[in-house]
Amino acid sequence: MNYSWCILWCLVCPIQERTCLKVLFRLFFSFLKIGFLGFGGGYAMLSLIFEEMTSFGMTVEQYADLNALDVLIPGPIAINSATYVGQLYAGFLGAFVTTLAVCIPSVVFVNLFSTYENRIRENLYLNGILTSIKIVSVGLIFSVALILMLSTTLGVDRLSDIGSANLDVTALVVMIGTIYLSLRFQINPLLLTLLAGLVGWFLFFL
C-alpha cells in the first residue's frame, strides 16, 4: 500500500488541523466503544460517556448539563449525548462523527439479532447473559445519579472527598422535592425538569 499521500499530508497540513483530526479520531473510537458496551439503554450509557470523556477534560458541571439536555431535547438519549459531546469538543464535524460512531454498533447488533432471533430466545446461556446485563445497567444508572447528587448538593466529585463537602441546601431541597413529586404523583420528567429550571432561575435573582 502506498502511504506517500499520508506523508505528504502530514508535511503540508497545518499542525492545528492535524490536532483537530486527532481529536475527531479519538471521539469516533471513544463513542464506538461506548456504543458497543452501552447495554441497558441510554441512562446506563451516560456513566460510560462520563468515564470516557474525563480524558477530554469533561467536568461534572458539563456532565450535569448533558443530563439536563437529554431530558429536554427530543430523541434517543445516546444520540443526544453523543451529538452534544461531539459539538462541545470538535464543533459540527465532531457532532457528526460521534453520532455516527454511537449508531454503528446498534445497527450491527439489531441486524444480527433479527437474523438469529429464534436461536437467541431459545439459548439459555444468552438469556442468562442478558439478565446479568440488566442488573449491571441498574448499577450504572445508580452511579450516574450518585455522581450528579454529590456534585450538585455537596460540591464534590467522589465519595472519598465527602469530608470537604459544602452542602447546598437549595439544591438538596429541589432534589428531594423532585423525587417526591416524581414518585408520589408520577409527573412527566420533562415537566419536572422545566419546573426545577424555573425554581433555579427564580432563586438566582433573589
Image: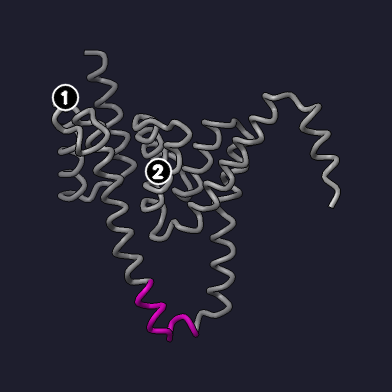
Query: In the rendered image, which residue does mark 2 sit on?
Result: 51
Residue 129 vs residue 148: left or right? right
Residue 125 place in picture, x, y as percent = 39, 81
Task: Tell me the amino acid under the disc marked 1.
Answer: Asn
Residue 175 place in picture, x, y as percent = 19, 36
Is residue 122 shown in magenta? yes
54 lies above or below 204: below
State whether the magenta stretch is mostly helix, strand or loop. Answer: helix
Query: In the rendered image, which residue does mark 1 sit on?
Result: 166
Is residue 99 shown in magenta? no
Nearest to viewer (mark 2 / mark 1): 2
Residue 165 vs residue 44: left or right? left
Q: Which residue is at a point 63% across and 36% down the rendered structure image? A: 22
Q: Which residue is at a point 80% across and 37% down the rendered structure image? A: 7
Q: How many marks?
A: 2
Residue 163 vs residue 81: left or right? left
Q: CA distance from mark 2 to mark 1?
A: 24 Å
Q: Which residue is at a point 47% across and 49% down the rendered structure image? A: 78
Kindly state the secondary structure of the residue where label 1 is placed. Answer: loop
Along the viewing direction, whichever of 144 and 203 lies nearer the viewer: 144
Q: Which residue is at a point 22% across and 19% down the rendered structure image? A: 203
Residue 120 place in picture, x, y as percent = 47, 80
Badge 1 density bin: few <14, some 14–19, many ≥20, Cα 10 Å: some
Task: Tell me the amino acid under the disc marked 2.
Answer: Glu
Kindly state the secondary structure of the residue where label 2 is placed. Answer: helix
Q: Which residues are magenta?
A: 119-129
Q: Which residue is most to the top?
A: 206
